[in-house]
């Protein structure tokens, strides 16, 4: 007994489903991998805000965190959750997973119905067509989209880590700006007192107009220094605010009065290149891209001779004639285009991807070396100011004051020493800021949080407020 055409079509569809499997969406949409990576590499988890309830819960969390002065880790945690540009990037995962699920599903069959009448006869033709090429290549297409989904996870994670690194840099710049403003105000107040003293000495005839003008000029420059420091601090704070995604009352967040102390020991990374190649997500993404391109090349070769292949079930009746059943097969004949151009193009794209991978790896090695040298230099410089320059300046100031009290030095010499100490302390604050920013750069260049040195948070007073 011959199987009806409709049943045979259903059998074909069932066989296709068995070949391709049943694609479905994952509960987390691939986001768990991103959150785990940010926890490991940035020190804070993240979350995709899917609803108004998620946003309200985050707002409550932000209010609790903003009630206290922010630490660097707090700032990173807020940015990973609240940065709206980053939240937009997170939704790339949903797009990539939808493409993956779509690739694993069969193309809908096409049903055709034809009704003609002429010469007193009526003809009716019905067709049901399946795309066999889509059926045959569906498993490979699913694997390719699966690699694209994994690559999207890496790219989204890399963007999250970039925001985390930018936030750390902006945080240290903002704290340093606040510290610099406070010190500039102290210098300005001292300069004001010096200028007033100089004026009184000049009126008493104990100081020349030249010396008094010098103190007035120093006070004027100190006032300008406060303005410049305030503007720089405001710009640094606004950059941090943008990265945190805060607005309204949230912009009134508080920062510490000064930078963290220098660690007792620097990080030791004897094989920084290997660490970068193993941990950096841009290298991993370039590797996945090359693998994806290779798979695409395989697909091109598999279909180079078959561009259109469709199988259709046909049922035709009309004009009182017996009903006719059968099938229709359409195959494109490779008479003019044998697919060689597409294969050559795919091979060129693959070799392009291979060279980009090598270039990415070379850049990663170089950037890691450069960041580590900059980090060690910044550490040594900050330690030099803390352990050598500032103690020497304090010793000189103490001796100068002692000699002034003993009437061995003039007021002018005392004030000149104060100006020199001001320059040294400002440089020490800047050196400490450069160290913490170099620390953030090193983490970014090595693909995540670099191993911390022993007693990472132990440090010595560098005397910046003395």
Image: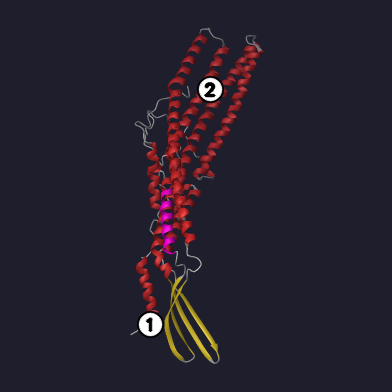
Residue 218 position, x and y percent, is: 60, 20
Report if residue 78 is visible in the image.
no
| Residue, far left | 1
> Predominant secondary structure in magenta?
helix
Residue 65 position, x and y percent, is: 44, 42
**Relative side of 204 to 82, left or right:** right
Residue 452 against residue 61 in the figure, above or below: above
For label 1, the crowd category at 10 Å Cα-Cα, with few meaning under 14, some 14 to 19 and many 20 or more, is few
Report if residue 318 is visible in the image.
yes
**Residue behind mark 2:** 423
For label 2, the crowd category at 10 Å Cα-Cα, with few meaning under 14, some 14 to 19 and many 20 or more, is few
Residue 312 against residue 203 in the figure, above or below: below
Query: Which residue does the image show at 51% across and 45% down from the upper left?
Result: 246
Q: Which mark is residue 282?
A: none
- Residue in the foreground of this view, choosing between 193 and 439: 439
- Residue in the foreground of this view, choosing between 23 and 170: 23
As helix, strand or loop, the secondary structure at mark 1 comes to loop
Query: Which residue does the image show at 64% across and 10% down from the upper left?
Result: 204
Residue 11 against residue 205 in the figure, above or below: below
**Residue behind mark 1:** 4
- Tell me, yes or no, whether the two marked residues, 1 and 2, touch with CB atoms within 8 Å: no
**Relative side of 286 to 178, left or right:** left
Q: Quadrant of residue 50?
A: bottom left
Magenta highlight on residue 112: no
- Residue in the foreground of this view, choosing between 70 and 236: 236
Residue 178 against residue 350 in the figure, above or below: above
| Residue extent of the magenta highlight | 286-303
Label 1 vs label 2, nearer the camera: 1
**Relative side of 219 to 99, left or right:** right
Query: Which residue does the image show at 54% across and 24% down from the upper left?
Result: 186
């Amino acid at each position: 007994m011959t199987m009806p055409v409709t049943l045979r079509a259903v059998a074909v569809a069932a066989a296709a489903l068995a070949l391709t499997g049943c694609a479905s969406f994952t509960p987390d949409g691939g986001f768990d991998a991103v959150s785990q990576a940010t926890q490991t590499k940035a020190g804070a988890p993240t979350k995709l805000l899917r609803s108004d309830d998620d946003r309200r819960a985050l707002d409550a969390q932000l209010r609790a965190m903003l009630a206290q002065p922010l630490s660097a880790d707090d700032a990173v945690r807020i940015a990973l959750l609240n940065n709206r540009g980053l939240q937009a990037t997170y939704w790339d995962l949903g797009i990539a997973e939808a493409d993956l699920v779509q690739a694993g599903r069969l193309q809908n069959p096409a049903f055709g119905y034809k009704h003609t009448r002429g010469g007193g006869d009526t003809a009716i033709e019905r067709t049901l067509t399946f795309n066999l090429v889509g059926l045959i290549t569906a498993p490979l297409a699913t694997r390719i989209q699966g690699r694209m989904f994994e690559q999207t996870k890496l790219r989204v994670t890399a963007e999250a880590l970039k925001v985390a690194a930018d936030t750390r840099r902006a945080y240290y710049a903002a704290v340093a700006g606040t510290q610099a403003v406070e010190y500039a105000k102290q210098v300005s107040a001292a300069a004001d007192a010096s200028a007033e003293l100089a004026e009184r000495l000049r009126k008493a005839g104990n100081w020349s107009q030249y010396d008094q003008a010098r103190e007035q000029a120093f006070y004027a420059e100190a006032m300008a220094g406060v303005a410049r420091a305030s503007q720089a601090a405001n710009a640094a704070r606004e950059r941090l605010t943008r990265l945190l995604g805060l607005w309204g009352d949230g912009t009134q967040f508080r920062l510490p009065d000064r930078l963290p102390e220098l660690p007792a020991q620097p990080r030791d990374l004897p094989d920084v290149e290997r660490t970068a190649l193993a941990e950096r997500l841009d290298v991993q993404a370039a590797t996945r891209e090359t693998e994806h391109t290779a798979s695409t090349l395989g697909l091109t070769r598999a279909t180079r001779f078959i561009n259109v292949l469709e199988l259709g079930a046909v049922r035709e009746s009309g004009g009182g004639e017996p009903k006719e059943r059968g099938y229709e097969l359409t195959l494109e004949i490779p008479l003019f285009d044998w697919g060689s151009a597409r294969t050559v193009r795919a091979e060129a794209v693959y070799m392009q991807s291979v060279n980009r991978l090598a270039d990415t790896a070379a850049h990663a090695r170089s950037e890691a070396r450069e960041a580590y040298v900059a980090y060690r230099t910044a550490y040594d410089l900050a330690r030099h100011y803390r352990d050598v320059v500032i103690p020497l300046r304090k010793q000189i100031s103490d001796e100068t004051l002692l000699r002034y009290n003993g009437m061995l030095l003039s007021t002018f010499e005392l004030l000149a020493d104060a100006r020199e100490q001001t320059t040294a302390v400002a440089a020490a604050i800047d050196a400490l800021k450069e160290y913490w920013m170099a620390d953030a750069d090193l983490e970014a260049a090595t693909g995540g949080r670099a191993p911390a040195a022993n007693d990472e948070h132990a440090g010595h007073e560098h005397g910046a407020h003395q």
